[in-house]
Image: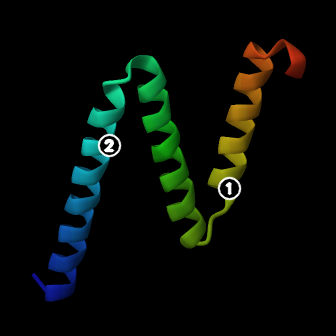
Amino acid sequence: MTQDSTAAQRSIANQLKHLQERQSAHAKNGPKGIAAAWYDRARSVATKRERAGDPEAWNQLARALENWCGSWDPDNAQ
């Protein structure tokens, strides 16, 4: 294994640990906290995809949120 792959694996492991810690902390706030954790994760994934040259993840996330708001917000009915 090369030093670069070891560093990359360590980085991924650290990111996963951080994500799990944040999700656990958010979960203490019940469904509201869990929703916040998923939103944090969605933004993280969309940012990574954008950096990889694929901005479509942001478009899909925006559409999903728009659809959700349209279903729950009577002032934003579609």
Q: Residues within 10 Å of mark 1 (few under 14, many from 20)?
A: few
Nearer-the-camera pick, 3 or 14: 14
Q: Secondary structure under badge 1?
A: helix
The vertical placement of 29 against 46, above or below, is: above
Q: Is residue 24 left or right of residue 65?
A: left
Residue 77 in view here:
no
Query: Whole-percent x and y of residue 5?
Result: 20, 79
- Say which quarter of the image contains residue 4: bottom left
Residue of label 1: 56
The x and y percentages for residue 25 are: 29, 35
Q: What residue is disc 2 on? A: 22
Quarter of the rendering occupied by the C terminus: top right
Q: Amino acid at mark 1?
A: Glu
**Residues at circles 1 and 2 in contact by the CB criterion of under 8 Å:** no
Identified at 60% across, 66% down, the residue is 50
Q: Earlier in the sequence, mark 1 or mark 2?
A: 2
Picture layout, residue 15 above or below residue 34 = below
Label 2 element class: helix
Q: In the rendering, at what x and y percent does residue 45 appear? A: 49, 53
Residue furthest to the front in view is 29
Which label sits in the foreground, 1 or 2? 2
What residue occupies the far bottom of the structure in this picture?
3
